[in-house]
Structure formats: C-alpha cells, structure tokens
Image (spheres, grey):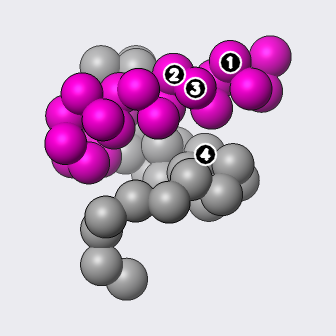
Amino acid sequence: MESMERGMIISALKRFHGDQHRAAEALGFFLVGLANKIKQYAILTNQPG
C-alpha cells in the first residue's frame, strides 16, 4: 500500500513539474499532508530547502 501511495505522489509531482500545491490538489491531500508524505517516503524534490 505504501509503495503504491509513494508511486502516486511521485507521478503527481512529475506531472506538475514539482509543484507540490497542484500535486496535493490532484491527490486530494492538504499541502502539509503531502509535504509530510514526501518526508516520510524520502522523496527527493527540486524544491529548495
């Protein structure tokens, strides 16, 4: 289940060129929820910081 969710997050981030706000909307997450999932799954992003 976690690997499926991780894959969906990665796909959404790619589709929206790293735009976490748009990816969160598409996935039905709040932005802070997506940020927590990105950290939890150790997903690398192009976002500074």
Instruction: Classify mark 4: helix, strand or loop.
Output: helix
- x and y percentages locating residue 13 in the rendered image: 33, 38
Contact? badges 1 and 3 (CB < 8 Å): yes
> Start and end of the magenta stretch?
1-24
Instruction: Classify mark 1: helix, strand or loop.
Output: helix
Contact? badges 3 and 4 (CB < 8 Å): no
Q: CA distance from mark 3 to mark 4?
A: 11 Å
Query: Residue 8's mark?
Result: 2
Q: Earlier in the sequence, mark 3 or mark 4?
A: 3
Rendered position, 47 above or below 21: below
- x and y percentages locating residue 36 in the rendered image: 58, 53
Q: Amino acid at mark 3?
A: Gly
Q: Amino acid at mark 2?
A: Met
The local crowd at label 2, few if under 14, some if 14 to 19, many if 20 or more residues have their Cα within 10 Å, is some
Rendered position, 21 above or below 3: below
17 to the left or right of 33: left
The local crowd at label 3, few if under 14, some if 14 to 19, many if 20 or more residues have their Cα within 10 Å, is some
* Magenta segment includes 33: no
- Tell me the residue at 80%/16% (across/down): 1
Q: Which residue is mark 4?
A: 37
Q: Which residue is mark 3?
A: 7
